[in-house]
Amino acid sequence: MKMEMPAGETTRLVVAYLHSGGFPQVAARSAGIPLKVFRAWMKEGQREKAPALLREFYLAVTQAQAQARLRAEITAFNDKPLEWLKHGPGKSRGKECGWGPSAKGKGKKEVEASSLLEIPGLARELKKLLEMLEPYPAARKALSEALEKDAAGLEFDES
């Protein structure tokens, strides 16, 4: 069975829906692509030696998803910096930074550090973050206060 190929206009439409904040499957269905076909295109497009149109479709969709997520993260950083600090990119999900309550691995017990001091290089990174937050005094203060409990040995100049 020969797989049909996405047309350029179909790719542009799906990408536009993704840039607007749509989820991939909904964007595809809104563009008239059956879910089964969308999944097949994405699976085949992952292969480096996929037909050019499928590879271009896959790359365009994954790039649009990343751009939409980045725009949401930037908005959260600007509009709700405390939420960004509490639930944002510092939380991991598998191999990718994510938003959530904890870092978990597949099939493994949740990994928790008993102290922030146990994380290599964290003091340096936290100091950089505090410097970056200087234009946002409320977020900077909230971060500093949150760190006080666990980072007693870290020195941050709050002046």
Image (cartoon, rainbow, N blue to C red):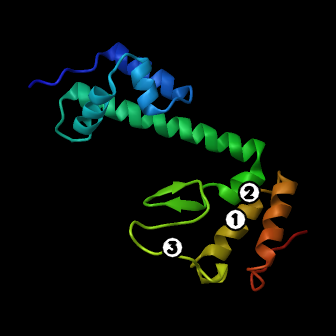
**Is 132 placed above or below 59 here?**
below
Q: Nearer the viewer, residue 60 or 31?
A: 31
Q: Residue 57, image x and y in percent?
A: 32, 28
Left or right for 77, reference 67: right
Amino acid bearing label 3: Glu
Read off the residue under disc 1.
128
Q: Crowding near pointer 2: few (<14 within 10 Å), some, many (20+)?
A: few
**Is 134 placed above or below 58 here?**
below
Q: Nearer the viewer, residue 109 or 130?
A: 109
Q: Residue at horizontal 76%, vertical 46%?
A: 80
Q: Nearer the viewer, residue 116 or 105?
A: 105
Name the outermost residue toward the bottom. Answer: 153
Q: CA distance from mark 1 to mark 2?
A: 6 Å
Q: How many numbered discs?
A: 3
Q: Residue 58, image x and y in percent?
A: 32, 33
* Callout 2 secondary element: helix
Left or right for 60, reference 22: left
Name the outermost residue toward the top. Answer: 9
Amino acid bearing label 1: Lys
Q: Residue 114, image x and y in percent?
A: 63, 83
* Callout 1 secondary element: helix
Q: Residue at horizontal 49%, vertical 33%?
A: 23
Q: Are marks 1 and 2 in contact (CB under 8 Å)?
A: yes
Which tag, 3 or 2, sits closer to the chain's start?
3
Which tag, 1 or 3, sits closer to the chain's start?
3
Read off the residue under disc 2.
132
Displayed quadrant of residue 89:
bottom right
Q: CA distance from mark 3 to mark 2?
A: 30 Å
Read off the residue under disc 3.
110
Q: Crowding near pointer 1: few (<14 within 10 Å), some, many (20+)?
A: few
Name the outermost residue toward the right. Answer: 159
Amino acid bearing label 2: Met
